[in-house]
Amino acid sequence: MITDSKLAKEIIAKRVAKELKDGQLVNLGIGLPTLVGNYVPKGMHITFQSENGIVGMGPKAKAGQEDTNLINAGGQCVTVLPEGSFFDSSMSFALIRGGHVDVTVLGALEVDEKGNLANWIVPGKMVPGMGGAMDLVMGANVVIIAMRHTGKGKPKILKKCTLPLTAKSQVNLIVTELCVIEVTANGLLLKEIHKDTTIDEIKSVTEATLIIPDNIKIMDV
């Protein structure tokens, strides 16, 4: 088990970045997914979108160089590339709802065997709202979940989500610090595992049933 939180997030972000392809328009969700932009291979051109109205978002602003008027959807100070542009929320969500976003990378509270996603609320806790997650998982062509494998020691990959759903059957890929799982019509396919873990360990911290192929790869991170 990888217990170092910073290392775990780095592993996840690096592996997700390898799923991106040159020329794509990619939305990065709040939290861990924002790290993915740090690991895009050199020479690859990815256009990042923030649903509050930015296309062409650059890296997170360096300490001391923050512009508080220039933030992403999570309120973090970011930069914008020379070709970047700004527009209102209606245009931003027209891009999302119109199917123009190639990939969205989101965090999750729970994912289940059917590709259902719960990532917006824990009952009894105050939140500002669902945000753009509902639109993103329905509008993006590919939905990648980037999350820690467990939360407070409990599995987050379940047989059936227990929290209110963000969307049903929309998740395509799950990347954690331990493994890469593809959501298929037959269930959850374990495709890759981290070099410092085992299939048995992954099964012990996963409530969902995993399909275990003969040719599991080691994660390239």
Image (cartoon, grey):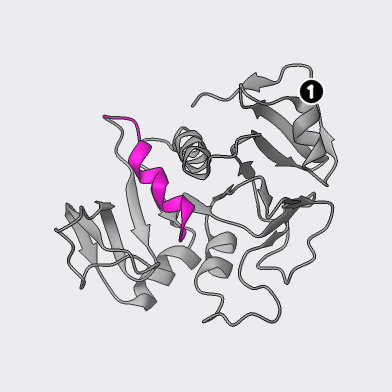
Point out residue 219 in the picture as x, y percentages from the top left corner.
57, 25
Q: Quadrant of the N terminus?
A: top right
Point out residue 194 in the picture as x, y percentages from the top left corner.
61, 26
Q: Which picture quadrant has residue 27?
A: bottom left
Q: Is residue 122 left or right of residue 6?
A: right
Q: Which picture quadrant has residue 160?
A: bottom right
Residue at x 81% of width, y 35% of height:
203
Residue at x 56% of width, y 75% of height:
130
| Magenta range | 29-42
Residue at x 41% of width, y 64% of height:
95
Q: Which residue is mark 1?
A: 213
Q: Identify whether 76 is placed above or below 152.
A: below
Point out residue 84 in the picture as x, y percentages from the top left corner.
21, 57
Q: Which picture quadrant has residue 184?
A: top right
Three-letter code, disc 1: Pro
Q: Nearer the viewer, residue 182 or 157?
A: 157
Secondary structure of the residue carrying tag 1 is loop
Q: Residue furthest top?
A: 215
Point out residue 22 in the picture as x, y percentages from the top left corner.
36, 35
Judge the density around disc 1: few (<14), some (14-19), many (≥20) Cα neighbours within 10 Å.
Answer: few
Residue at x 76% of width, y 26% of height:
199
Q: Identify whether 54 is placed above or below 20.
A: below
